[in-house]
Image (tube, rainbow, N blue to C red):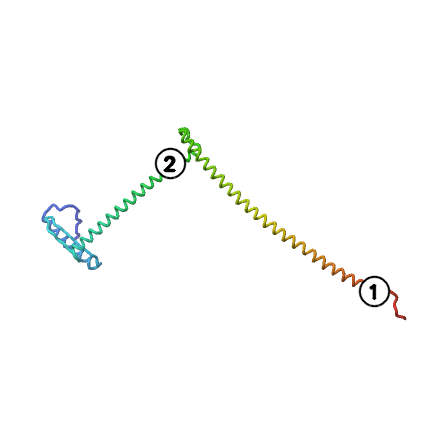
Amino acid sequence: MVRGKIEMKKIENATSRQVTFSKRRNGLLKKAYELSVLCDAQVSLIIFSQKGRLYEFSNSDMQTTIERYRKHTKDHETSNSDSEIYIQQLKQEASHMITKIELLEFHKRKLLGQGIASCSLEELQEIDSQLRRSLGKVRARKAQLFKEQLEKLQAKEKQLLEENVQLRQKTAINPCRESTEQQKKFKVIDLNLEVQTDLFMGLSDRHD
């Protein structure tokens, strides 16, 4: 026989309601016991009937379990509260940063000469002073860069001059050596010619 599906609503008949309560209560207590044994879980179950009768199960001290539950709930609420406070702080910081950025953009537009029609004389004088200070810093940085670049070029020029002097010294020594060696070769050639000339000059002493 197929068991019909029970509609999830209050059972109006008192007798049927009590029978269902007893069956499901026993089944729930049995499941709690099995869960505590099979899974080594700390389980505590509290049931109050419609008439106020207490039914309970716990595999450990019930009061200890309740205190543990209260502590866990309190910690969880504290954690949520801390998270909410942190989120609120982030929102306030973001709002402050947005306001600061808008203010900086407003001053930037004024420095660029935009929206100054409504500025007072004091505000225009302050803008003029800021521009003069900024211009002075820009010129100082520009002069520093020019000076550094000039020093690098002077160092490079000095290095090239030294290399040029070394090259000139090398080219001045080598031709002298080559000239001396060539003179020695010419002297040897002249001696050979003189020897050959002595051998063939004059009449022969041989008589046929």
Q: Using the image, tell me which numbered label, if any, was put on residue 198.
A: 1
- Decide: is 5 above or below 208: above
Residue 58 or 26: which is nearer the viewer?
58
- Residue extending farthest to the right is 208
Which of the marked residues, 2 or 1, is nearer the chain's N terminus?
2
What is the spatial separation of the Cα atoms under label 2 and label 1, in whole angstroms? Answer: 112 Å
Q: How many marks?
A: 2
Q: Which residue is mark 2?
A: 103
74 to the left or right of 197: left
The quarter in which the C terminus is drawn is bottom right
In the displayed structure, 157 sits above or below 104; it is: below
Task: Report x, y in % for residue 29.
Answer: 16, 55
At 70% across and 56% down in the image, what residue appears?
A: 176
Question: Foreground: 164 or 84?
Answer: 164
Residue at 16 percent across and 45 percent down: it is 9
Q: What number is the disc on residue 25?
A: none
